[in-house]
Amino acid sequence: MEAFLSDIGYIWDELKFALVQQEHDVEFYEVIQAFEDPHALDEPDPQGNWGRYMVIGRTLSQRILQIIYSDEDLSLTRLITAFDANDYWSTLYEQRD
């Protein structure tokens, strides 16, 4: 049985989250902040994975995160990974109107 972290509307496999924390030093609350950024970019997954999407958003501490997610569960958004946005996505986020 898999264990999950959850916040209202979001769910994340604990083992995958532990890897994200270890590799990218991203906290769960930061992901939620970036995901709920009213200026966030929401795009199809740039890797082309069907049913997956990407959000580029800013945290309250001004960190710009790139988040891959799926909304396959309808009532919950399944978080897949999160990391600091690369230069391309950070610039795109900063330069839009």
Image: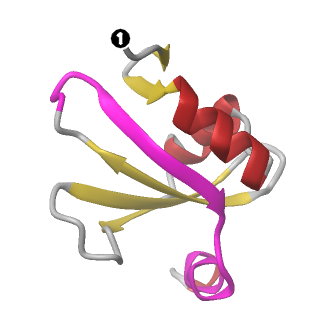
Q: Position of residue 26 (x, y in %)?
A: 73, 44
Residue at horizontal 65 percent and vertical 43 percent from the top: 19
- In the depicted view, which residue is nearer to us: 47 or 67? 47
Residue at horizontal 23 percent and vertical 40 percent from the top: 71
Quarter of the image with the N terminus in it = top left
Residue at horizontal 51 percent and vertical 44 percent from the top: 35
Q: Position of residue 28 (x, y in %)?
A: 65, 31
Q: Is residue 87 magenta?
A: yes
Left or right: where 3 falls relative to 32: left
Q: Please, is residue 82 above or below residue 76 in the view?
A: below
* Residue 32 appears anywhere in the view: no
- In the depicted view, which residue is nearer to us: 33 or 25? 25
Residue at horizontal 84 percent and vertical 47 percent from the top: 61
Tell me the residue that label 1 is attached to: 1
* Residue 75 appears anywhere in the view: yes
- In the structure shown, which secondary structural element does the residue marked by tag 1 occupy? loop
Left or right: where 56 falls relative to 58: left
Q: Amino acid at mark 1?
A: Met
What are the residue bounds of the magenta stretch?
A: 73-93
Q: Position of residue 94 (x, y in %)?
A: 65, 78
